[in-house]
Amino acid sequence: MVCRWLLGLALVSLVGCAAGGVAPIDRHTSAPAPQAEEAVWESLLNDARRSPRRCGSEAFDAAPALVSDDALDEAARQHSRDMADSGELGHTGSRGEDLSDRIAAAGVSARAWAENVAAGQPDAQAAITSWLASSGHCRNLMTPEFEAYGAAVAHAEDGTPFWTLILVAPAD
């Protein structure tokens, strides 16, 4: 499902199964994130997973730490850039590809996956905070089976940031 971004804050979540602040990125690029930015993402995500929490009506125990994956970072970067270029927030890319296509193209073998996307939040902390406030996004973040992630932001010409977080459970 693709949603037209019309408000300052927008969120979309996708789950699939098989059998503070971030240094600003130039609004017209989707260049690889500096290592400092990667450390910020990892810290923010793992801080969120470190404590038990409720995601809507579902209770989650603290979840194991996530580890950044370069291939997933690149897949997230490409999807954020695609959303920023089109101005559309969603899980289906401009060429019809979905998250499973992006994971396969990245060469990652996974038994389960999820993707959170958002637009309008000024930094990674705000994006994660908004995801934690949404039961579906929160559930994605707190699912203990997920072990690796890729995260990115790209800015549209008008400066709107488009965020992508990909979470995977590796294939056994």
Image (cartoon, rainbow, N blue to C red):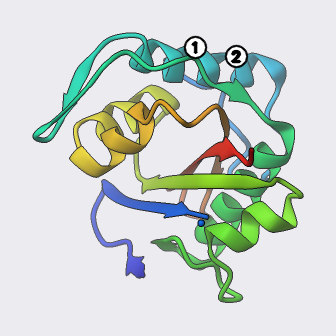
Rendered position, 5 above or below 9: below
Nearer to me, 4 or 107: 107
- The amino acid pointed to by label 2 is Ala
Rendered position, 127 above or below 98: above
Residue at (14%, 41%) from the top-left corner? 56
Do the CB atoms of the residues marked 2 and 1 lie less than 8 Å apart? yes
Nearer to me, 41 or 13: 13
Rendered position, 39 above or below 162: above
Nearer to me, 109 or 148: 109
Q: Position of residue 144 (x, y in %)?
A: 47, 30
Q: Quadrant of residue 17?
A: bottom right
Report how far apart the C-alphas of labels 2 and 1 lie in the structure: 6 Å
Is residue 160 found left or right of 10 in the rendered image?
right
Q: Which residue is mark 1?
A: 43
Q: Is residue 28 among the parts visible in the rendering?
A: no
Callout 1: few (<14), some (14-19), or many (20+) C-alpha neighbours within 10 Å? some
Rendered position, 81 above or below 85: above
Callout 2: few (<14), some (14-19), or many (20+) C-alpha neighbours within 10 Å? few
Residue at (74%, 44%) from the top-left corner? 172
Q: Is residue 8 among the parts visible in the rendering?
A: yes
Is residue 168 found left or right of 116 in the rendered image?
right
Q: Position of residue 94 (x, y in %)?
A: 65, 84
Residue at (33%, 11%) from the top-left corner? 51
